[in-house]
Amino acid sequence: MVEYSGYTPVPIMDWSSITGKIATDLQKTIDERQAKREALDKEAESAVSKINEYQSSKAPTFNQFIMDGANNARDFIYEQNKLLKRGEITPSEYSKRVSSLSDSWKRLADNAKTFDADYLEQVKRIESGEASAQEIFQSKINSSIANLKDKKLYINPNDARVYIAQVDPHTNQVNSEADLWDVQTMNAGLNQ
């Protein structure tokens, strides 16, 4: 009878399998995103762990300087994590910033271990007359860096690198970009 009236039967849709596939694909996407979130959280935890690995020096003022900087670094990582979770930065930007901070902090810790010994060796070379004009100039810069009065460790929000910053004694804020010393080059003049 259907054939005589011109009616063509429509195949029956298997809505059960269609919705099952949608649900499976959705769950797969949710699981992938959760795995990425967990990886980014582990990255942050690892960076904070590296910051916490600082070995104290004999100078209490320097230890306090580093501990204050470590607090700033941890706050920076947590703030980046909040920005990521609010969707204000991408996972790629987040990873770059946390990685840059970790690398910069590791360099700071490495430089801090050898700074005193290298500086004393430089002073000895200057006093004996063996130092070059460049070494003498660098010694003056290093002396100003080593004086921690009105200085703090500053994390640049643009590149997430750690700097030693000259701060205004009244506001405790960085005076200008010219008052920043990159910790990655801190010992460069000592090792010539």
Image: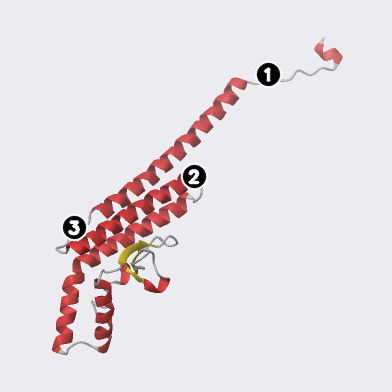
Residue farthest right in this picture: 5
Q: Which residue is mark 2?
A: 86
Mark 2 is on which residue type? Arg
Q: Which residue is tagged 1?
A: 12
- Label 3 sits on a secondary structure element that is loop
Amino acid on which the number 3 mark rests in the picture:
Gln
Gap between marks 3 and 1 measured at Cα: 71 Å
Q: Which residue is mark 3?
A: 55
Report the mark closest to the observer, 1 or 2.
2
Residue 14 location, quadrant = top right
Q: Earlier in the sequence, mark 2 or mark 3?
A: 3
> Which residue corresponds to the image point at 30% horizontal and 68% vertical from the top-left?
150
Does label 3 or label 1 sit earlier along the sequence? 1
Image colouring: secondary structure
Q: CA distance from mark 2 to mark 3?
A: 35 Å
Spot occupied by residue 125 in the image (x, y as percentages of width and height): 16, 84
Identify whether 122 is placed above or below 38.
below
* Label 3 vs label 1, nearer the camera: 3
- The disc label shown at residue 4, or none: none
Give the mark count. 3
Disc 1 to disc 2, how far (Cα)?
Answer: 44 Å
| Location of residue 110 in the rendering, given as x and y in whole percent from the top left corner | 24, 64
Determine contact: label 3, label 1, CB under 8 Å.
Answer: no
- What residue is shown at x 58% (from left), y 23% (from top)? 17
Task: Give the mark nearer the N terminus: 1 vs 2.
Answer: 1
Task: Count residues near mark 1 (Cα–Cα under 10 Å), then give few for <14, some for 14-19, many for 20+.
Answer: few
Dot 1 amino acid type: Ile
Considering every residue shown, the one lying at the far front of the view is 170
Disc 2 is placed on an element classified as: loop
How packed is label 3: few (under 14 Cα within 10 Å), some, or many (20 or more)? Answer: few
